[in-house]
């Protein structure tokens, strides 16, 4: 079964994802101890920024491969790598994460397999995690980072926005994907043949007055804006309700202590 990618691939959407990258990549790299990792494969590599960040961190001689199914994402990722003068840093391969385009000799050869924001977009996350476990050597690491959309908390509360947020993430179920998969990461690792050994989160919130508040609010707005047309056509969120919610967010963000709490689950396991 294949699914449409809900975030879309418009230039505006890609810009939002890129801005978010800068923050997230630094925060995630700070959480990962990458000493000793020489071979890394990034499943669902998207625009490839994190894949290249891994390659920069691992340094010369490391082998880093990104696997991405969407051809437009892949093409843009290659252009971005080229523009950054980093085309040789990591290899970006087209293919499906469930049946990754890895040669027989590459299977069971990686020190670390990584997937971020992928499992929430696939109908069978366990199949992907199994493919990731198969890609790493015995004792190798599998790092999963994925959303649990219920972890969003706005304070003060902003009910119109919160209602639309819930309708947004519930729409994942229409395409057979799990918007709360982040809470299941250890369970998936165990079922796929890895021993979960660490659970943490990447903080992606902000309070008004902090430097990144606007970016975090814009990201929230961008996620909902990007999904608005589809949510309207499916009848889940009429346009008017979406517009009301986004207006409420604009008012909310002026509040002196407006704070967004959001954390992204990260779980790591080792192949038995
Ligand atoms: C939200 S993006 C995340 C990209 C990247 N991992 C990051 O954190 O920046 C999810 C990516 O997974 C890709 N994707 C979705 N299903 C896939 C599959 N079955 N195999 C490979 N890539 C897939 C999408 O095309 C998209 O580029």
Image: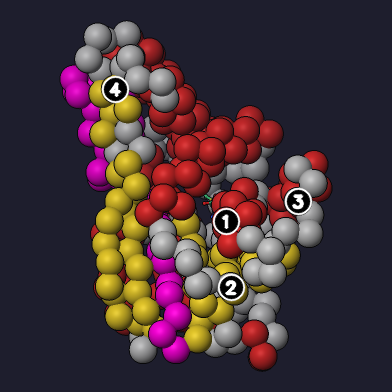
* Front tag of 2 and 3: 2
Q: In the rendered structure, does residue 215 fall within the stretch colored magenta?
A: no
Whether pointer 2 and pointer 3 mark residues with C-beta atoms closer than 8 Å, the reply is: no
Mark number, residue 38: 2
Q: Which residue is mark 4?
A: 207
Q: Nearer the viewer, residue 271 or 158?
A: 271
Of the numbered discs 3 and 1, the one sitting upstream in the chain is 1
Write the residue at 69% across / 64% down.
60
In the picture, which quadrant includes the N terminus? bottom right
Of the numbered discs 1 and 4, the one sitting upstream in the chain is 1
Q: Which residue is mark 1?
A: 57
User: Is the residue 143 above or below the residue 155 in the image?
Assistant: below
Work out whether residue 137 can be spotted. yes
User: Is the residue 191 above or below the residue 227 in the image?
Assistant: below
Q: Nearer the viewer, residue 193 or 112?
A: 112
Of the numbered discs 3 and 4, the one sitting upstream in the chain is 3
Q: What span is colored magenta in the figure? A: 138-165
- Real-space Cα separation, disc 2 to disc 3, in angstroms: 18 Å
Dot 2 lies on which element?
loop
Dot 1 lies on which element?
helix
Write the residue at 26% across / 34% down.
261
* Residue 266, position as x, y percentages in the image: 34, 58
* Residue 95, position as x, y percentages in the image: 67, 69
- Real-space Cα separation, disc 4 to disc 2, in angstroms: 38 Å
Q: Which residue is mark 3?
A: 86
Dot 4 lies on which element?
strand
């Amino acid at each position: 079964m294949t699914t449409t990618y809900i975030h879309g691939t418009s230039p505006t959407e890609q810009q939002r994802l890129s801005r978010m990258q800068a923050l997230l990549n630094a925060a995630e790299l700070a959480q990962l101890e990458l000493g000793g990792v020489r071979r890394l494969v990034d499943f669902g590599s998207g625009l490839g920024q994190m894949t290249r960040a891994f390659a920069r961190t691992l340094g010369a001689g490391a082998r880093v491969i990104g696997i991405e199914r969407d051809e437009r994402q892949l093409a843009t990722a290659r252009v971005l790598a080229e523009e950054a003068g980093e085309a040789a840093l990591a290899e970006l391969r087209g293919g499906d994460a469930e049946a990754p385009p890895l040669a027989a000799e590459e299977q069971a050869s990686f020190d670390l397999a990584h997937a971020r924001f992928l499992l929430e977009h696939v109908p069978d996350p366990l199949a992907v995690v199994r493919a990731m476990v198969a890609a790493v050597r015995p004792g190798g690491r599998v790092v999963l980072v994925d959303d649990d959309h219920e972890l969003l908390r706005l304070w003060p509360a902003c009910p119109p926005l919160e209602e639309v947020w819930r309708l947004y993430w519930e729409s994942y179920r229409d395409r057979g994907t799990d918007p709360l998969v982040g809470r299941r990461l250890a369970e998936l690792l165990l079922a796929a043949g890895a021993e979960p050994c660490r659970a943490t989160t990447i903080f992606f919130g902000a309070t008004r007055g902090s430097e990144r508040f606007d970016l975090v609010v814009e990201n929230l707005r961008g996620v909902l804006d990007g999904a608005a047309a589809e949510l309207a056509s499916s009848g889940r969120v009429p346009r008017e309700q979406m517009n009301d919610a986004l207006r409420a967010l604009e008012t909310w963000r002026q509040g002196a202590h407006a704070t967004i709490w959001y954390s992204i689950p990260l779980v790591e396991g080792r192949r038995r």
